[in-house]
Amino acid sequence: MSYPTIGQLEREIAQRISALYYEQLGQRPSQVVCHFFDTELVISLEKSASLVELTLISGGYENLAEQVRLFLDKIIKRQLQSLLEEIIGKPIVDLMTNTNLVTGRTGIIVILQQLPEVRNPESIPKANLKNLAE
C-alpha cells in the first residue's frame, strides 16, 4: 500500500471539509487551509458563515446568529471528527472549533494520538518521529 505525501493528505482533508460545509450549510468556504504540526492538525476556513447567519447579522440579530453558529458547529463537529478519522486513519483525541461571524473565519484544531502514515513524515513541521514508531 502506497501512503500519500503530507501535502496530498492536507489537500484531501481541505477538499473533503469544503464539500462537507457545502453539503451541510449550502455554501463552500472560499478557502480551506490545512497543516499538520506533529500530532496536531490546524485547519482554517475563510468565508465559512452561512447566508442565514449573515442575514441575521445584517438584520441586527447578532446574538441569534451566534447561537445558530454554536449549534451548527456542534452538529458539524461530530461529522468532522468522523470524516477526519476516516481520511487520516488514526483516532482523534480532541477536536476544537470556533467561528468568528464578524470575520467569517472558522478555526479547527485537531489533536491526534499519533502521526498519520505518510510517505514523507520528515516534512511535517515539529514532527516527533518517535511517534511514527509507536
Image: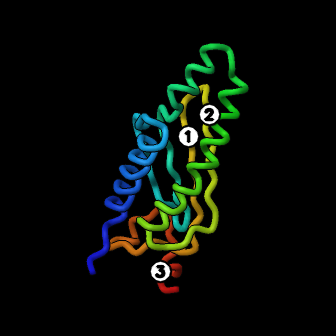
Q: Which badge, 3 or 1, comes first in the chain's sequence?
A: 1
For the N terminus, give its image quadrant. Answer: bottom left
Residue 25 x/y as whole percent: 48, 38
Residue at the far right: name it.
63
Query: In the visual, does 66 lie left or right of 120?
Result: right
Judging depth in this view, the residue of 39 and 79 nearest the camera is 79
Nearer the observer: mark 3 or 2; the answer is 2
| Mark 2 and mark 1: Cα distance apart in space | 6 Å
Give above or below for 63 relative to 69: above
Residue corresponding to mark 3: 132
**Label 1 crowd bin: few (<14), some (14–19), many (20+), radius 10 Å:** many
Q: Residue at x 60, y 49 (%)?
A: 75
- Amino acid type assigned to the residue bearing label 2 in the image: Asn
Q: Which mark is residue 106?
A: 1
Coordinates of residue 29 in the picture (x, y in percent): 43, 37
Q: CA distance from mark 3 to mark 1?
A: 30 Å
Q: Which residue is pictured at 46% across the width and 55% down the height?
A: 35
Amino acid found under the numbered disc labelled 3: Leu
Marks 1 and 2: in contact by CB < 8 Å? yes
| Neighbourhood count class around disc 2 (C-alpha, 10 Å): few under 14, some 14–19, many 20 upward | some
Residue placed most toward the observer, 79 or 88: 79
Q: How many numbered marks does the figure carry?
A: 3
Which residue is denoted by mark 2 in the rendering? 100
In what element is the residue under mark 3?
Answer: helix
Task: Please report the residue visible at 40 percent of the width from the left and 34 percent of the height from the top.
Answer: 30
Examine the rendered structure and indicate whether residue 62 appears above or below residue 35: above
Measure how far apart labels 3 and 2 are at the Cα level. 35 Å
Looking at marks 3 and 2 on the same chain, the residue that comes earlier in the sequence is marked by 2
Label 3 CA crowd tier, 10 Å (few <14, some 14–19, many 20+): few
Choose between 29 and 38: the one closer to the eye.
Answer: 29
Q: Provide the secondary structure element on which disc 2 rests.
A: strand
In the rendered image of this protein, does residue 48 appear above or below residue 85? Answer: above
